């Protein structure tokens, strides 16, 4: 009887091993992953996996509070356009960024409009694995920003306005929780290219000065987010 049991065990293990398509993700073609010996696409994972946050949701909202210390806090939304890739749309309130205010007002010597802000969009890609909901990410974005400033030069008052195109890459690591919440830590680095940077004295409006140029752009991102949908 023991010999017969051993034979059945060997046969069962051989059959199971013969049916296994893979043992790790790199053995699967394309973006498919290895789940319990089978190569499957992210959409084919069980509903149970989705409950534990292994599959990215179709839509998410996020907030980046560390922007207060740099170029302004960010509020945005992500829309899934591929299994692990999101289209990002966001608003950055640059008037509330400390570094931005220091640069624009020349260390608070001048004043800046509270209407200074930027709108943008980009792509974020998550490098997910079948064994963990947490993942590193990379991406990039483009923004359009604008601001108004004013001050006093001796006894002469002046006003100025500027608009910029900001281009930056970003990356970091995202921790995704079963509740749908996620935390991300990373950074962004790029440049701000002036479309317009003009100012004039109020007593000589026809004499407008243009001081356009390029400024570095960088932020440390700590992001709080919430995944919605399926």
Image (tube, rainbow, N blue to C red):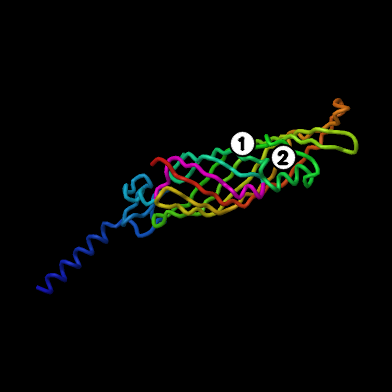
The residue depicted at 43 percent of the width and 52 percent of the height is 177
Comparing 202 with 193, the one in front is 202
Residue 104 drawn in magenta: no
Q: Is residue 222 left or right of residue 179?
A: right
Image vertical order of residue 116 relative to residue 206, above or below: below
The residue depicted at 40 percent of the width and 49 percent of the height is 179
Q: Is residue 57 left or right of residue 101?
A: left
Classify 10 Å Cα crowding around label 2: few (below 14), some (14-19), many (20 and above).
some
Question: What percent of the width, then of the height, locates residue 127?
Answer: 48, 52
Disc number for residue 119: 1
Residues under labels 1 and 2: Cα distance? Answer: 15 Å
The residue depicted at 40 percent of the width and 56 percent of the height is 25
Image quarter hosting the C terminus: top left
Question: What percent of the width, then of the height, locates residue 170?
Answer: 59, 49
Disc number for residue 23: none
Residues rendered magenta in the picture? 53-70
Question: What percent of the width, then of the height, locates residue 31?
Answer: 42, 48
User: Element type at marker 1?
Assistant: strand
Q: Which quadrant of the figure has residue 35?
A: bottom left
Q: Which quadrant of the figure has residue 106?
A: top right
> In the orientation shown, which residue stands out farthest toward the right?
155
Question: What percent of the width, then of the height, locates residue 228?
Answer: 42, 41
**Mark 2 = which residue?**
193
> In the orientation shown, which residue stands out farthest toward the bottom?
2
Classify 10 Å Cα crowding around label 1: few (below 14), some (14-19), many (20 and above).
many
Image quarter hosting the N terminus: bottom left
User: Element type at marker 2?
Assistant: strand
State which tag comes first along the sequence, 1 or 2.
1
> In the orientation shown, which residue stands out farthest toward the top?
206
């Amino acid at each position: 009887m023991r010999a017969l049991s051993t034979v059945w065990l060997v046969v069962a293990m051989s059959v199971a091993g013969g049916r296994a398509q893979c043992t790790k993700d790199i053995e699967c073609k394309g973006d498919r992953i290895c789940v319990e010996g089978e190569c499957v696409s992210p959409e084919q994972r069980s509903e149970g996996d989705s409950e534990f946050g292994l599959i990215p949701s179709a839509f998410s909202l996020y907030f980046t509070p560390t922007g207060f210390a740099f170029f302004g806090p960010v509020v945005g939304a992500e829309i899934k356009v591929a299994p692990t890739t999101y289209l990002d749309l966001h608003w950055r309130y640059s008037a509330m960024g400390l570094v931005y205010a220091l640069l624009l007002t020349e260390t608070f010597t001048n004043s800046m409009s509270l209407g200074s802000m930027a709108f943008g969009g980009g792509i974020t890609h998550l490098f997910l694995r079948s064994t963990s909901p947490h993942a590193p990410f990379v991406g990039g974005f483009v923004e359009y920003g604008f601001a108004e400033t004013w001050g006093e030069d001796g006894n002469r008052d002046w006003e100025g306005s500027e608009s910029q195109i900001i281009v930056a890459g970003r990356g970091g690591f995202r921790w995704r929780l079963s509740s749908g919440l996620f935390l991300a830590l990373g950074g962004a680095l790029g440049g701000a290219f002036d479309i317009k940077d003009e100012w004039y004295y109020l007593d000589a409006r026809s004499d407008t000065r243009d001081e356009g140029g390029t400024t570095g752009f960088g932020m440390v991102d700590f992001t709080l987010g919430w995944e919605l949908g399926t």
